[in-house]
Image: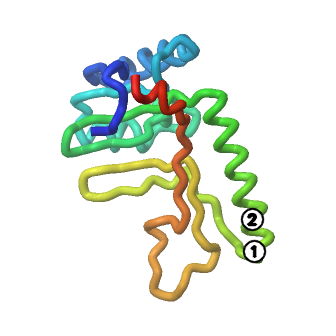
Amino acid sequence: MFCLQASTPTYRFSGPEQCKLVLNQCLGVQSRLVNDYVIFLDVEGGSFYEDFLSCEENNILKLWKEYDQYHSIILFRMESRIHAAASMALHSFIDIWALNMSSILIPTSTAIVRTATRAKRPDCAWQPADLPKGRKDTWPSIVVEICWTEPRNKLQK
């Protein structure tokens, strides 16, 4: 569904405290993780909106990346130092580009894009400060996902 490795750690959700415990454990061993993702199954919509969307900003539950309400699955990304550095560099690059183009873009990277059955948080996103007449601010204009690529021979293994 999320195109992740079969070895991605997967857990059944039994509440926010259990989720926090697992995520903290994963952060503690992140350098030894096979990949940077963790999946929780059986996350009902009500729990997602109550436990993940309404929690305070510094809560570990804010690490969620994507939620699929139809399948009751939530995906967390345990951000690595490489990913964080790439994200910051890209933010700086786009900001400088926008200034040189005399464009005023507003970063909306924390904006959550929702549909009827999914919620997703981009790595980086921007939209114009002044939207064209009639355009809603529901969707950002530029959305970027940061990913780590592997050499072709490693991907083929």
Q: Secondary structure at mark 1?
A: loop
Q: How many C-alpha atoms fall within 10 Å of the one at disc 2: few (<14), some, or many (≥20)?
A: few
* Proximity of marks 1 and 2: CB atoms separated by less than 8 Å: yes
Q: Eyeballing the image, is 104 above or below 16?
A: below
Q: Position of residue 1 (x, y in %)?
A: 27, 39
Residue type at numbered disc 1: Met
Residue at left 31%, top 27%? 40
Residue type at numbered disc 2: Trp
Q: Eyeballing the image, is 143 above or below 127?
A: above
Residue at left 66%, top 40%? 86
Q: In the shown orientation, is residue 89 left or right of residue 10? A: right
Q: Which residue is mark 2?
A: 97
Q: Position of residue 18 (x, y in %)?
A: 36, 18
Q: Position of residue 121 (x, y in %)?
A: 46, 48
Residue at left 51%, top 88%? 133
Which residue lies most toward the bottom here?
133
| Measured Cα–Cα span from mark 1 to mark 2 | 6 Å
Q: Which mark is residue 112?
A: none
Q: Which residue is mark 1?
A: 101
